[in-house]
Image (spheres, coloured by chain):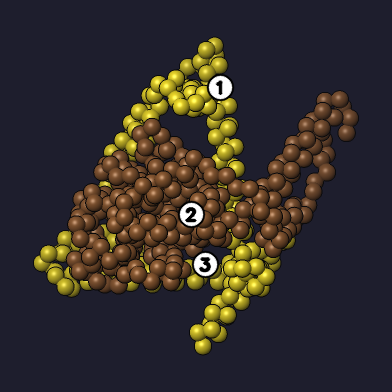
Amino acid sequence: MGKTKQLDRRWLFLLIFLGVALPLIFSIGLPLETTKNVQMVYDLVDSMPKGSKALISFDYDPASMPELHPMAKAVVKHCFDKEIDLIFTAMWPMGVKMADDIIDQLIEDYPDLEYGENYVNLGFKAGGMITIQSMGKNFREVFPKDMNGNSIDELPIMDGINNFSNIGFIFSLSAGAPGIKEWVQIAHDAYNRPTSGGCTGVSAPAMLPYINEQHQLTGLLAGLKAAAEYEVLIQTPGTATSGMDAQSIAHLIIIIFIAVGNINYWRNKRKEKKGGK
Amino acid sequence: MEQFFATLGIWLGAIFTFAIFSFLYKDNPFYKTAEQIFVGLSAGYWFVYTVFSILIPNLYDPLIQNFSVNWIKIIPAILGIMMLMRLIPKTEWISRFPISVVIGTTSGVFFLRYLKSDVLNQLTATMINPFVGESWVMVVGKIMLIVGTISGVIYFYFSKKHTGALGVSAKIGIYFLMVSFGAAFGYTAMARISLLIGRLQFLLGDWLGIIQP
């Protein structure tokens, strides 16, 4: 192969850094369109009657906060606006803190909401798929207490919740396993409850096949872009929306470099064929 | 005091972010220090978390509070201790028993769930009438779904040489696989940029106050 002039990769790092930092400081306001999968999630939440119950599982840790926290905030806010009672769980240990942080960020805007009546944080339980399966059989055996040590028999929100049957829908915010996949396999495929979720961009290709004719997954929020779309749908722009300009510019830089790299490769190959250097 | 620690936390976060980012220039002592501190802190944090959030509420408390009902929890506790025998070379063999229990149980549970969710339901979702759809885009999409699934599976059929019709189908399958790899790469690039956006939102917002956090 011919000798290719290599660009120091640190220039690319610097360009990406500037391509992300500058649009964050000087907003461009590039247009953002809602995709079908995000609309499906929105419609699912929107279709729930007032006073219905939903389970939101925080299956991620701080490493995935930039992607999953904005969508968690948007979905929880939408549920609170629709007066849906929320049961928070976590299949990841740090998910408990993630749920707490979202509640802390939102609760000031909803002074009428009562802990134990309108929302509850049941905390973390180890076991992944086995735990979810047990919740489907006997919820109270898996979570006899909430994260503060209160018996769930004393919490009004848990009245009538013995398994998944009285839960309107299940939403998993997932950064890996256990996460959306396990909730689909148990909550939807075994107990036939509407299941939806939000995941990191990296894990999205593995989740997308579940959005099918069988409705294994009702929509999907994949990565920061989907979080931004959801923020637009609920008309509450947040950190995801403000990051979209930076995301687009960074992608443009990557695309340009991929194109330039391929053109160079193709030119070198042609030169080689001709015997030149 | 609370304000002081909040500010200290933000400054530490900023310093460690720069220490980690400095690796992009070249390996250096700042990066190494940040890396070692992260590993040490994580290990310590998880140890404490495991003891107080898993072992005590799920094992110690139930046994102390109602032993006659919860005595069965002794079995997983013993299996857990047997697993720790791996740390001593002479008793390492004991850990094979709990590992075999874990593998056996996991494969038994996962086999059923994966067979239903990832095989049967996925196959059923492909058995559709492709010509029924609200628009021509949906019809084309359904046809591509069927063609992509069949040709993709054919590519992984290795018991016959990929020639003739089988070869053409396998070739089409490769193209579908390439498109899916491209989509996966795109999502990965998006995810990595999102993480950078998150860090820069922290640096420019929480730390420097240039943008609204």
| Residue at position x 86%, y 25% in the image | A274
The local crowd at label 1, few if under 14, some if 14 to 19, many if 20 or more residues have their Cα within 10 Å, is some
| Chain letter of the residue beneath label 1 in the structure image | B
Q: Indicate the amino acid at tag 1.
A: Ile
Taking the view exactly as shown, the residue that stands out farthest to the top is B164
- The tint chain B carries is yellow
Circles 1 and 2: CB atoms closer than 8 Å: no
List the residue tagged with mark 3. B39
Earlier in the chain: of badge 3 and badge 1, it is 3
Outermost residue to the bottom? B1
B121 to B31, vertically: above or below: above
Q: Which label sits on residue A234?
A: 2
Instruction: Mark 3 and mark 1 in contact? Answer it, CB < 8 Å.
Output: no
Residue B40 in view, yes or no: yes
Q: Which chain is brown?
A: A
Q: Residue at x 28, y 38 (%)?
A: B112
Q: Is residue B77 left or right of residue B210?
A: left
Q: Quadrant of residue B98?
A: bottom left
Name the residue at 27% across, 47% down: B105
Give the image location of residue B75, x and y in percent. 20, 60
Mark 3 → mark 1, Cα distance in angstroms: 46 Å
